[in-house]
């Protein structure tokens, strides 16, 4: 199955939740210290983070290119008795984001090919209000040797310093590479992993 959309639609069409139903722990810990507002979650998948954030009082805009992902997210929201504000189907490579609109953006394992990664990150940066926060967790390039999930291409894995430099108006309040992290997010992310975590605030350009 060479078409990425076909791959993800097939993966999300299964009854089980590939990455579980609990939120990503880094995202949850970060938004737990913030006053709720508008939150953007690109590549949200099955809705675990959107449902959690909604329950915490956030107004969440989710985006994914998979119809199956959206269907699973709506099922999870119904089971958790919440109503998602917005879940759009779209391709992140050409998606038009609202400008200076969000109090926070969560990038949870959003792995973008290097050819358009920086452009995507700068669009994300522009979508934040002044003082808005960015929360990121992703696989480091050394994840390629692990079987706990993530892209199988080095090009789509991340280097902490490179990612930080993609954003021109973000003051990084927290940045770390964790070479040995016990990841347990459903069957899709399970085992020892090499990850990066970032948390920052948008300052003046």
Image (tube, helix red, strand yellow):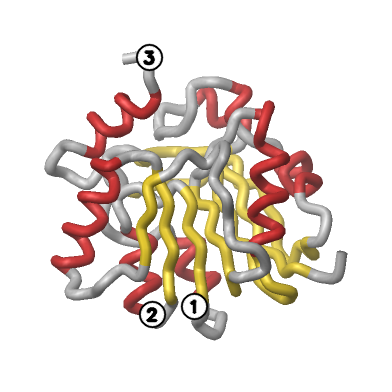
Reading the image, the residue beneath label 3 is 2
Secondary element type, mark 2:
loop
On the image, the x and y values in percent for residue 129 come to 68, 72
Which residue corresponds to the image point at 47% horizontal and 58% vertical from the top-left? 41
Reading the image, the residue beneath label 1 is 32
Reading the image, the residue beneath label 2 is 56
Residue closer to the observer: 104 or 25: 104
Q: Earlier in the sequence, mark 1 or mark 3?
A: 3
Which residue corresponds to the image point at 36% horizontal and 58% vertical from the top-left? 87
Which quadrant of the figure has residue 34? bottom right
Which quadrant of the figure has residue 52? bottom left
Residue 195 appears in view: yes
Which residue corresponds to the image point at 60% horizontal and 22% vertical from the top-left? 154
On the image, the x and y values in percent for residue 97 come to 58, 55
Q: Is residue 23 above or below residue 183?
A: below
Whether pointer 2 and pointer 1 mark residues with C-beta atoms closer than 8 Å, the reply is: yes
Which residue is most to the bottom?
35
> Where does the C terminus fall, quadrant-wise?
bottom right
> Where does the N terminus fall, quadrant-wise?
top left
Q: Earlier in the sequence, mark 2 or mark 1?
A: 1
How far, Cα to Cα, is label 2 from label 1?
8 Å
Secondary element type, mark 1:
loop
How far, Cα to Cα, is label 2 from label 3?
38 Å
**Alpha-carbon neighbours of circle 2 within 10 Å: few (<14), some, or many (≥20)?**
some
> Which-is-in-front pick, marks 2 and 1?
2
Q: Earlier in the sequence, mark 2 or mark 3?
A: 3
**Alpha-carbon neighbours of circle 1 within 10 Å: few (<14), some, or many (≥20)?**
few
């Amino acid at each position: 199955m060479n078409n990425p959309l076909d791959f993800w639609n097939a993966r999300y069409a299964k009854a089980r939740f590939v990455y579980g139903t609990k939120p990503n722990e880094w995202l949850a810990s970060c938004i737990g210290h913030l006053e709720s507002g508008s939150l953007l979650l690109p590549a949200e998948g099955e809705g675990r983070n959107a449902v959690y954030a909604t329950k915490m009082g956030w107004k969440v805009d989710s985006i994914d290119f998979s119809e199956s992902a959206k269907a699973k997210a709506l099922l999870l929201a119904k089971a958790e008795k919440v109503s998602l504000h917005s879940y759009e189907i779209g391709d992140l490579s050409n998606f038009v984001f609202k400008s200076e609109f969000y109090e926070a953006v969560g990038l949870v394992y959003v792995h973008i090919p290097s050819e358009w990664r920086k452009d995507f990150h700068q669009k994300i940066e522009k979508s934040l209000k002044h003082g808005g926060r960015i929360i990121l967790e992703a696989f480091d390039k050394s994840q390629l040797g692990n079987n706990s999930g993530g892209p199988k291409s080095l090009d789509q894995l991340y280097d902490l310093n490179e990612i930080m430099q993609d954003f021109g108006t973000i003051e990084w309040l927290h940045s770390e590479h964790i070479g040995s992290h016990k990841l347990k997010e459903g069957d899709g992310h399970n085992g020892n992993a090499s990850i990066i975590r970032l948390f920052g605030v948008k300052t003046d350009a």
